[in-house]
Image: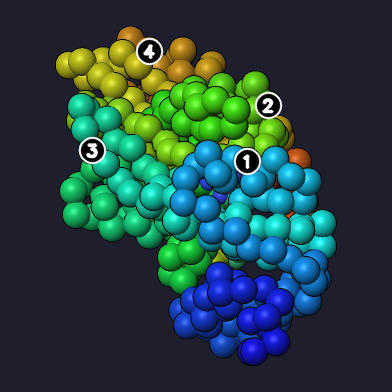
Amino acid sequence: MLILFRFSGICLLRTIHLCLPDAGGVVLRDKNFRKIVESINMLHQNLEWFFPHTPEEAVKLIAAQGVILHGGGTRILKTSPKSIKGLVDVGKLNLNYIHHSDKQISIGAASTYDDVIRYSTKTKKLSLLAQALSEAASTPLRNRITIGGSLKDFPIWSSLYAPLLALNAQIEIADKHDKVISLEEYLESGMIKTKHLIKRIIIDDDPHLVGGVKRFALIRFEYPLFTVAVALRAKKKIISEARIYITGVKGRHKHCKRAEHFLIEKELTNDVIHEAVKHFNPKFAADYKYSAEYKEHTSKVFFTDLLQDLKGKL
Ligand SMILES: Cc1cc2nc3c(=O)[nH]c(=O)nc-3n(C[C@H](O)[C@H](O)[C@H](O)COP(=O)(O)OP(=O)(O)OC[C@H]3O[C@@H](n4cnc5c(N)ncnc54)[C@H](O)[C@@H]3O)c2cc1C
């Protein structure tokens, strides 16, 4: 353990400790532990850690080649750490907060999945997002995975993107200048691929928005194949606004505009749901387990279930 401590610093060791009491079972625990130890052995031997106190400092530090931000570290340990020469920890940047003001909720980038879930339980806000995050990974991992790290990483199994896109979230980032843009623009413009610091995510606190999210994973503790999220606004049961997104598809995410258009100015009846599904056609890539057709069919079943759930809430 002492050797590990020397090579990789306090944060990685904390990750190991947090992964050990995984509720997932002994086999998984051993596998995770082995993978983490293997990853640590691959890290650059002179890896430097930085603990800046301001976002400006952090942005300057990551301008150097091979120096990247460290949120929860859960992805960094799984990828190609040999190219990493320095890690800039976000822990001291005062980005671990969830604020509610002026009909908006701001989630600091260093907040973990678990912070969001706890906030939602306490305040009854952000329930769509909290529902998605509470199904992600395992308890120890949700204690580590940060909102900023997950947004930048955007794994195909992301539990974060579909609900945030359905909620029309905005993102504040810092590189040379601070800017606030919609999360959709962040993806569409390719900004996600550039080097920057994510500072926070901003979501409208809209009590009239009704939403739901579903993820498809065969086993509870498995990466989801896709996550679909729907947010609807209605006046006297007639839908005035619809936002529908799915992740895990070809191209990683899809804004399902055809299904949205179909739903506008309609009441969510069984017949409308039956027709809406015909306008919901995400495309998937086959993998070693499932064909693209199977995933497409399953996504339609999940979308139908989601609309059925929302029918009673509008
Ligand atoms: C077994 C397992 C199962 C998982 N299951 C799920 C799941 O079901 N759903 C889900 O959503 N996630 C899941 N995850 C998490 C996901 O795969 C990533 O590991 C996670 O999203 C990365 O977040 P992090 O905070 O640990 O980021 P890190 O590993 O710290 O960093 C990831 C990337 O983001 C960058 N970064 C970090 N912070 C910032 C910031 N503030 N601004 C800009 N860039 C930053 C880093 O430089 C790095 O490039 C799972 C992970 C594991 C290990």
Give the label, 1 or 4, closer to the camera.
1
Please provide percent x and percent y for residue 170.
44, 28
Q: Residue at x 63, y 63 (%)?
A: 49
Q: CA distance from mark 4 to mark 3?
A: 30 Å
Question: What element does badge 2 sit on?
Answer: loop
Q: CA distance from mark 1 to mark 3?
A: 30 Å
**What residue would you read off at disc 3?**
100
Give the label, 4 or 3, closer to the camera.
3
Q: Label 2: few (<14), some or many (≥20) within 10 Å?
A: few
Q: Earlier in the sequence, mark 4 or mark 3?
A: 3
Q: Earlier in the sequence, mark 2 or mark 3?
A: 3
**What residue would you read off at disc 4?**
264
**What residue would you read off at disc 2?**
190
Q: CA distance from mark 2 to mark 3?
A: 29 Å
Snapshot colouring? rainbow
Dot 1 amino acid type: Lys
